[in-house]
Amino acid sequence: MAKQRVLFMCTGNSARSQMGEAFLRHYAGERFEVHSAGLEPKGINPYTIRVMDEVGIDIRNHTSDSVRKYMGFMHFTYAITVCSHADQNCPHALWSRGMKLHWPFDDPAAVEGSDEEKLAKFREVRDQIAAKIQSWVAELEAV
């Protein structure tokens, strides 16, 4: 049986969508083919790498990709937007045969302040994403 394809999207593909991709692979990679992309990719935020390392998930081999990489080449069972900008601008062609879900999370990269304040926000969002994905996977397994 083919794996269901999932695409996590945000504007920059630097934090939230990267975390979503990593956590879904970690929790249910045998069930899903997981990707992430951004409308305007900016590279992976170093804080994203740091907070994922803290939970034992290495994302150094991830790339920050544009949604254009998938347009016309791949269709997704689930397109999951993690910011309102991506939700409003998600190309329908990516999920026309599947389902679009919107899971809004605060942008940790928008936080200004000390290193510790930034890390705290990245940790908070990381934990919210992990919890959401665990809940979603459990929901799907119950069906």
Image: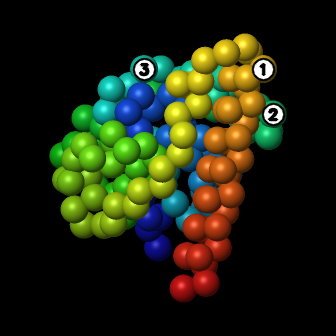
Q: Residue at x 33, y 66 (%)?
A: 99
Secondary element under disc 2, as helix, strand or loop, is helix
Count residues near mark 1 (Cα–Cα under 10 Å), then give few for <14, some for 14-19, many for 20+: few
Secondary element under disc 3, as helix, strand or loop, is loop
What amino acid is found at the position of numbered circle 3 in the picture? Lys
The percent position of residue 17, horizontal first and vertical second, equals 50, 40
Quick one: quadrant of the C terminus? bottom right
The percent position of residue 44, horizontal first and vertical second, equals 53, 23
What amino acid is found at the position of numbered circle 2 in the picture? Glu
Horizontal arrangement in the rendering, residue 24 relative to residue 116 (left or right) = left
Identify residue for label 1: 116
Q: Which residue is drawn at 48% across and 55% down?
A: 103
Q: Distance between the residues labelled 1 and 3?
A: 22 Å
Q: Residue at x 26, y 52 (%)?
A: 94
Image: 106 above or below 129? above
Judge whether residue 68 can be spotted in this image: yes
